[in-house]
Image (cartoon, rainbow, N blue to C red):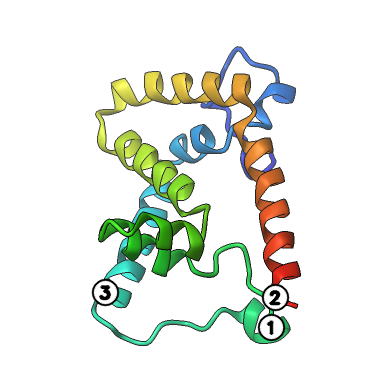
Amino acid sequence: MPLFQSKNVSENATSHSKRWHLIAALLAQPRLARAMLLGTSVYGLISLWGLPLMVCPWKNLTGLPCPGCGMTRSTFALLQGRYRESLESNAFTWVVLLMLMIVAVGVSIPARYRMVWIHSIGRWEHRSRWGLWFGIFLVIYTLTRWLSSF
């Protein structure tokens, strides 16, 4: 079974339609979702305390920013109300934070409501194909950042 597919996401949907499910598939694996949220929180706390963080291996190797470079700076700028600086540091931070909030709500609600949440998110993801658009824009954004680095 591919990484972002789950039997729990949409029982009546064909496997062809499940390929667009990113958030719903993550919500269908609550332990994985909680581990992701915990890791994100720990990383945020470490950076908030000013402790040294891992240097981006991609940027260290190539000298070019990876799609996630600047996301920590962007998040802190957003939390401090410096919206322009947040967008300049990494334009995808807002989308990723929104996704994290949706996942946090999904793993926090009782199990009997979680399936309704997962099905709703799955239907939205299928209709909007947001995972495809997110990937396309992320590639374009990354290439644009690379070209501006030269």
- On the image, the x and y values in percent for residue 120 come to 45, 19
Residue at image coords 66%, 37%? 133
SS assignment at label 1:
loop
Marked residue nearer the N-terminal end (1 or 2): 1
* Mark in front: 3 vs 2: 2
Which of pointers 1 and 2 indicates the residue nearer the eye? 2
Q: What residue does disc 2 label?
A: 149
Looking at the picture, how far across and down is residue 48, in whole percent? 26, 74
For the residue marked with disc 2, what is the amino acid?
Answer: Ser
Q: Are marks 3 and 2 in contact (CB under 8 Å)?
A: no
Mark 1 residue type: Gly
Badge 1 or badge 3: first in the primary sequence: 3
Question: What label sits on residue 48 in the rendered view?
Answer: 3
How dense is the environment of label 2, judged by Cα within 10 Å: few (below 14), some, or many (20 and up)? few
Q: Residue at x 37, y 87 (%)?
A: 52
Q: Is 47 situated left or right of 131 in this image?
A: left
Q: Residue furthest front?
A: 84
For the image, the number of numbered tags is: 3
Q: Are marks 1 and 3 in contact (CB under 8 Å)?
A: no
Instruction: Tell me the residue at 53%/21% (across/down).
Output: 124
Q: Nearer the viewer, residue 100 or 11?
A: 100
Q: CA distance from mark 1 to mark 2?
A: 9 Å
Mark 1 lies on residue: 63
Q: Amino acid at mark 3?
A: Leu
Q: Callout 3: helix, strand or loop?
A: helix
Q: Residue 136, relative to residue 51: is it above or below? A: above
Residue at the image point whose x is 44% and y is 42% from the top: 99
Q: Is residue 106 above or below residue 65?
A: above
